[in-house]
Image (cartoon, helix red, strand yellow):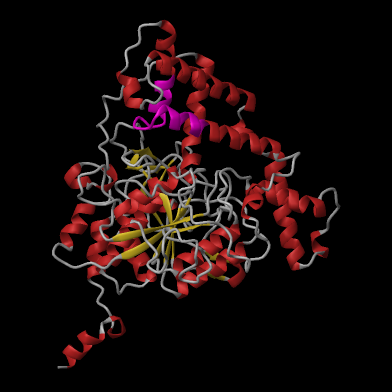
Amino acid sequence: MIMYKKALAGILLGTALVILTAGPIAAQGTSQKTETPKGWHLLDKNKDGFYGISLQGAYDLVKGKKSTTVVVAVIDSGIDTLHEDLTPVLWKNPKEIPGNSIDDDKNGYVDDIYGWNFIGGKDGRNVKEDSYEGARVYHKLKKKWADKQVDPATLSAEEKEEYEVWQKAKKKIEGQSIAGGVDLLLLKNAFKAAKRNDSILRVAMAKEVFTGKELEEYVPSASDAKSARNSLLYLFKANDIMDQTNKEFIEGFGDYLAGEERKAEAKDREPRNFRGEITGDNEEDINDRYYGNPDVMAGTPFHGTHVAGIIGAARSNGKGMDGIADNVRIMMLRAVPDGDEHDKDIALAIRYAVDNGAKIINMSFGKDFSPQKHWVDDAVKYAESKGVLLVHAAGNDHKNLDSTDNFPNATLKSLKSRASNWLTVGASSDPTAEAGFESLTASFSNYGKHEVDVFAPGTKIYSTIPGKTTYGNAQGTSMASPVVAGIAALILSYNPHLSPQQLKMVIEKSSTPVSELVKKPGSDDEVPMSELSRTAGIVNAEAAMKMALEIKPSKKDLPKSTLKNKRG
């Protein structure tokens, strides 16, 4: 599942219900906090006063040095290929001729110019919404295990494992609370109220589309417009989406509601095969791999566009914002719908990225079940063998990953090993900023003393969004992961001899240690940062670059011409 929506949903739901149950509420001021600058995540605490990644310091260290282009694959929902800040940095398949409907490079994917869409059909249709993996697993195993008296001691190892998965799925689907325990009808009414307020404001403001900032500046005279403005503005502010439009907000709320409705139906109704109806492949066969289409925009590119911009939006062009890495090419692999991604699509997306030259893969998605985990594990191992670093978002359920499943992950279960080329990233915040965050840890972030490697900025991150010249904020570990992927790409571009294991090492060891107590996400408990991640720190681009520059290439990494010169 796309993790930005999961981070947004908890806040959106809570504030929406306040609006519904308590009536219109005027937006509260935040004058006691420092205004959050756009791009705060790039700044330096000592120089700028914000808990960012000290990016400028990293660039100062390599001033005048040459860099090598690094291809970063983004497995996500899609990307706006027309965005002004992304078109200069998009990866383009050099062996493919655009639009000729021929597989010029004979890799099995026709017209794969910017990457590939694994959740599309050959007829041009694309998967938008999908079911949740828990529901898919529940109904698949229900036919075998439901209403049976089972003695686990009599089962084979394989059957026992399957039965345990069934028990977990049964507990989740039959016992899950919809929308965090809130009545679904109440959530529907909250959505209706938001839509009604939006309708009133579109007429009153004589604008079909307006941003949160424009709404804040609007001074209504009619009482119904005043009430609508206060209610909707509260939601914009509470969700930190003042740069987004009413259209995007209502659509996002609607998508969240639709997802909760699908969850509610999961117990009694087998989920529709949204994906299979369009892709047409045999999902049970990993070798049936040449499905999909080249449409990497596909009408749902918000999440992927935002993630891509964080990593590598064109720098110093005077437009919008700057990405972290200055010499990257973004390869988009569309495999994440509005719902849970499928293991087959993720495994093949990883393999496509590796085979087409990506050296870093960002994965801002996750789910509770992974029925074909061995396919993903094999792909991760393949990436490891080819020198590719994988960066994955920890998730937004404020859960402890040491005791809670979140897939994919670094544990290669079928291979009985752990991936050495994997970084799991939690989300940090800035307690000094206007957004109202009161801890260095983001309240929604998953954590884990053993399973989460580092934390990185993930709240109120300003980046590219669909619309060619459009930018806005989003938050989630979905945003923290590309911060780390961007740092990794920057380091690798100036130190191309580094292995993924060395990249992982310098990012971890150079992280800024957090000595003070922080809030454990999802609670008011204050704990040491060492209880929440392996490194007990927040990533620092400057310190990572400094450490990386000290690692000299071995002889096998040096060009032959250099070795010849050294021999005299």
Q: In this view, does 100 lie to the left or right of 327?
A: right
| The image quarter in which residue 526 lies | top left
What's the magenta bit mostly, secondary-structure-wise? Answer: helix
Residue visible at 38% across and 16% down in the picture: 26
Q: Which of 420 and 378 is in front in this view?
A: 378
Residue visible at 69% across and 49% down in the picture: 136
Residue 459 coordinates in the image, percent (x, y) = 37, 41
Q: Residue furthest bottom?
A: 568
Residue 334 coordinates in the image, percent (x, y) = 49, 53
Residue 238 magenta: yes
Residue visible at 34% across and 67% down in the picture: 503
User: Taking the image as drawn, is residue 188 in sight?
Assistant: yes
Residue 555 coordinates in the image, percent (x, y) = 28, 85
Q: Residue furthest front?
A: 100
Residue 530 magenta: no
Question: Vertically, is 546 above or below 304?
Answer: below
Q: Nearer the viewer, residue 164 or 8?
A: 8
User: Taking the image as drawn, is residue 538 in sight?
Assistant: no
Quadrant of the drawing holding the C terminus = bottom left
Question: Vertically, is 10 above or below 498?
Answer: above
Q: Which residues, given as a range, are shown in magenta? A: 232-253
Residue 335 coordinates in the image, percent (x, y) = 53, 54
| The image quarter in which residue 51 lies | top left
